[in-house]
Amino acid sequence: MDLFSNLALGFATAGTPGNLFFCLIGVLLGTLIGVLPGIGATATIAMLLPITFQLEPVSSLIMLAGIYYGAQYGGSTTAILINMPGESSSAVTAIDGYQMARKGRAGAALAIAALGSFFAGTVSTFLVAIFAPPLTAIALQFGSAEYFSLMIVGLVSSIALAHGSVVKALAMVALGLLLGLVGTDIYTGTPRFTLGIREYADGLNFVALAVGVFGVAEILRNLEGESTRTVLMAKVSGLLPSRQEFKEMIAPVIRGTAIGSALGILPGGGAILASFASYTVEKRMSKTPEEFGKGAVAGVAGPESANNAGAQTSFIPLLTLGIPANPVMALMIGAMIIQGIVPGPNVATEQPALFWGIIASMWIGNLMLVILNLPLIGLWVKLLTVPYYVLFPVIMAFCSIGVYSVNANVYDLYAVAFFGLIGYVLAKLRCEPAPLLLGFVLGPLLEENLRRAMILSRGDPTTFVTRPISAILLAIAVAVLIVVFLPSVKKKREEVFVEEA
């Protein structure tokens, strides 16, 4: 009965005119950046963080959440119509979706993607509602040692699921942890690694780092490839799947939803990994595997359901434990901190309207997406004709104004430029910046819980292995690290992410 009363509170909160407006803005903006290749949800949310400072906490988080799962919808539109995935998680959709479009079934492919995503979004929203409260209750029993071990699991898992070299991902986490040390020591009050700059006494600005590493670096990288960007317009007709296509999509949608819901909780690239895993499962289970790559309905329905389910269940560790499952969730934590909210299990008990309002807004946002997306397909594709050299200066101007407006600190603008160059160099070196951001966000929390646990145990490091839950979590972290370095697993891992190269 508590679940229904809590959901009623959530829908009452998310259903206010103001929150409905920001939910609509979020899903529209998410679809837009999902359609435009090269920008991405992470970069967009990083750029919009300064704006959220002026909004109510519930409204800002509802809007940012809408951008994230809205981008999953938008990415499929261009993947199907012009074989250009707007989001990494839509790369698999392009394989069969584009072939369906070439056969004149573009409308059906888009409808299959939208309906599959809506079903997956609905199921995963209820999974978040069901599992979040008990996990929150468990998390309230955690001490400093358990939180330290849990964060170690999160960082190790992000390394395991990062694209490219495991060693490079490990280096990115270490760099993020080091950047998180800049500021004032939490126990002694002594400035450290500030280079004598008073403005860095409170640490590096999270917004400046995120906008630089993701936003500015993405812009520089995409401007580099401007001359190779081409747009092919496709005429869309017949927006309803046939009876046979509808029949073929049911089982893949259910399987994709299950796969995405499970993998989305994992730190790293849950939504991306879920779409690849779903495609592999569908191809192996199909009675006609030769159809895959030639316009198979299951090749669109499964991955699209999986990536949307994965995107939404990644909110479970964020809302219950305050642990980000991916870079977007790390940015959501940043938005909560900007609003003066301490991420973690206390959010559900101290601010139930915010907690349940975000969950209810996910279903409302998915409903908005399925209603709005298909009629606006023509508009989204036309936006692809806007050249980057027109689009990006405008984005840069708004980013600079937004970052400066948070603290009115000119050093934040220098930091954006510096981290933008760093992010660009990392991209050229094929180092994924996502583990860096997770390390930066979790670093201060990791240090605080480590030192608190050591103080409580009077300096005894065995406290991390003598407490059962902490010991189990550390064992999981060690096992994941060992497994990911095994030659056979390393080879399989490279095959899974080959599409991302």
Image: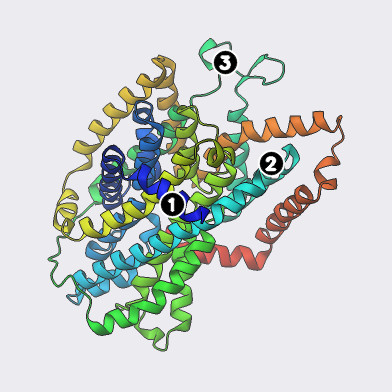
Rendered position, 120 above or below 481: below
Disc 1 residue type (three-letter): Leu
Q: Which of 457 and 271 is in front in this view?
A: 457
Distance (Cα) linking label 2 and label 3: 26 Å
Q: What element carries label 1?
A: helix
Asked whether disc 1 touches disc 3, contact meaning CB atoms under 8 Å apart, the reply is no
Which mark is nearer the camera, 1 or 2? Answer: 1
Q: What element carries label 3?
A: loop
Which mark is nearer the camera, 2 or 3? Answer: 2
On the image, the x and y values in percent for residue 191 come to 64, 14
Task: Give me the residue at 66% from left, 65% from top.
Answer: 487
Classify mark 1: residues with Cα within 10 Å, few (<14), some (14-19) or many (20+): some
Residue 201 has which mark? 3
Disc 2 residue type (three-letter): Tyr
Q: Name the residue under label 1.
A: 7
Classify mark 3: residues with Cα within 10 Å, few (<14), some (14-19) or many (20+): some
Residue 147 has which mark? 2
Rendered position, 205 above or below 72: above
Asked whether disc 2 touches disc 3, contact meaning CB atoms under 8 Å apart, the reply is no
Sequence-first tag of 2 and 3: 2
